[in-house]
Amino acid sequence: MGQTHVTRLKSKKDRANYIHHLLNDLKALDQMIENDMIESGPMRIGAEQELCIVNNQFFPDGSAEALLEAINDDHFTTEISNFNLELNLDPLILEKDCFSKLHKQLTGFLEKAKNAATKKQVHLILTGILPSLSVDKISINNLTNRPRYQLLNQALRKHRSQDFDVHIKGVDEVNLKSDSVILEGCNTSFQMHLQLPPKTFVDDYNWAQAIAGPVLSICVNAPILFGKELWKETRIALFAQSVDTRFNSFLLNEKQSRVNFGNAWQTGSISDIFKDNISRFRSFLNTNFSTDSTVMLEEGKIPKLKALAIQNSTVYPWNRVCYGVLNERPNLRIENRYIPSGPTPADEIANMVFWVGLMLGRSKVYNQIHNKWDFKDVKTNFFNAARYGMASQFYWNGEYIPSAKLILQELLPMAHKGLKKAGINIVDIDYYLNIIKHRVEGHTGSEWLIRNYRSLLKTHKRYDAMQILTAKMYEKQEKGYPVSVWGKIPYPEESLFKDERVVKHIMSFDIFSVSKKDSIKLVLHIMLWKNIHHMPVIGNNRTLEGLLTWSDLKTYSENPYRQDESVSSLMKTNLITTKEHMPINEAKALMDKYEIGCLPVLRNQKLIGLITRNDLN
């Protein structure tokens, strides 16, 4: 959980004071490491659970603040969007039944939150990206009204000086702009923390980077964004672009996004990892400082390194190094940020057990891996996993190995060995690693979502399919069984939400259009080729300028001499339109009243779809 009491860095005096404390924090960190003050043991685990809030129609619900008040538990806090919450679990010593204890703690807190949600007539869902999330929810109005997030948005906007661009290409493609960092709120994760001893920390961190690709490949659970099928773990691309402060790729310092995998192995000290981020990325947040961290050390006190923590909270490597203080003892941990939320608590704890087991079970052959492997191979493995999930081929020890083979034959046995060595109960080891094994042999969360979504699209329009998919995923989650045993959903021919349907449920998104300069001949041929009877006329920026119908063009089809005339000479400009959230019965009444066969659907005066009388049937 990041710093909550923050302000903007504005004046020259503020910046000078902040830099003074930041550099002293680094000195204090080095002193604590040199003097063996950083805790070497016992090792601990911890986690942060991000949640999606949906209404009874399974669309995002912006009731985070009200729900937080109803839960009334300091373990819960806000996230960047008002349709998300974050749950911070208590750290546990890595021993015996710690993972089943963490599982019990997680389900207990979730049950508490669900009880509060039921009273508010909302639901909580665990998923990397909410399938029913639509573009109209990506508005600054849905940014959580807390100073930390408002300041972060202002600072990032000022730093970038233009809208945030998102362009992700997978099976489908998403290309849009956002005027705020609210797109970050589309991502929900299960962030895993592992405390590690300082003496081997840098080598451990490099190993965490090396295994990131294979670990991610079996944990993917975010294939759909705004109804488009993209990467198996779309969060990896979306998060990087949603807070990208670079407006020019030729900037000298910020050559990589603040959300990044890194560009090279770590080869220096622990503080060098922090120094690299400080060198690349400027902080834009501030807080109150009472005493210098170096002075606190001289007085025999343990500093919290507030300036360093603030800097660290504005940089988002997928494996992030964190400093903390627990029971008056400083510690260092790796925060694994790339694992998505869901599909169930059992799946999430299994993901954690697999990752921690690999961190602890590393074979000697992988020690000092930075001297043996090319970092670009590791980085390629990570992004291949994000794109293709279990279909990935990883470059591992000098050869390409399919993900399933690598996990089953090498990584699961390695994780088992590491967990056993750490004294974890064999019952827990077998239970959670078997969840991973069954997922390899069955399917991941992303695969389940994709297969069912494609099946839905055969009989339902996109918006309807997104809604039903989310509802069915929620039903499966509530039963608690791991995703590997989720079967294909038997979908009804009619929508599950027929009484609450709006225009967006039935409208066509994939529509053909022409410009007013096009010829009638071209329009006639397109309508014949595609068997359509209505053709919108679009201007710059998707603004609707007119509409052509087959009845308008019928006489022209029999008169070739007039077919070279432009669309502007014939198109209707006095149009009746609708909005995407108008109830279907109202849209039908509108068509009946004006005796028209179609309604263009507009959002902010731009065409986003079309409904016809055939869609009403």
Image: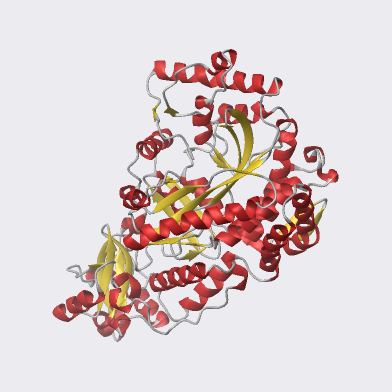
In this picture, residue 252 sits left or right of residue 3? right
In this picture, residue 87 sits left or right of residue 383? left
Query: Which residue is painted at 61% across and 73% down in the image?
Result: 485
Q: Is residue 187 visible?
A: no
Residue 558, placed above or below residue 212: below
Q: Position of residue 162 (x, y in %)?
A: 39, 40
Q: Residue furthest left?
A: 593
Query: Which residue is painted at 41% across and 19% down in the image?
Result: 14
Q: Is residue 154 visible?
A: yes
Q: Quadrant of the C terminus?
A: bottom left
Q: Position of residue 407 (x, y in %)?
A: 75, 60
- Closest to the observer, 377 or 538: 377
Q: Position of residue 60 (x, y in %)?
A: 37, 60
Residue 461, placed above or below residue 236: below
Determine which quarter of the picture holds residue 516.
bottom left
Q: Name the colouring of the figure.
A: secondary structure
In this picture, residue 103 sits left or right of residue 464? right
Residue 511, placed above or below residue 180: below
Residue 417, placed above or below residue 245: below
Q: Residue furthest right?
A: 365
Q: Position of residue 603 (x, y in %)?
A: 29, 60
- Closest to the observer, 450 or 78: 78
In this picture, residue 357 sits left or right of residue 100? right
Determine which quarter of the picture holds residue 149.
top left
Query: Which residue is painted at 43% across and 45% down in the image?
Result: 164
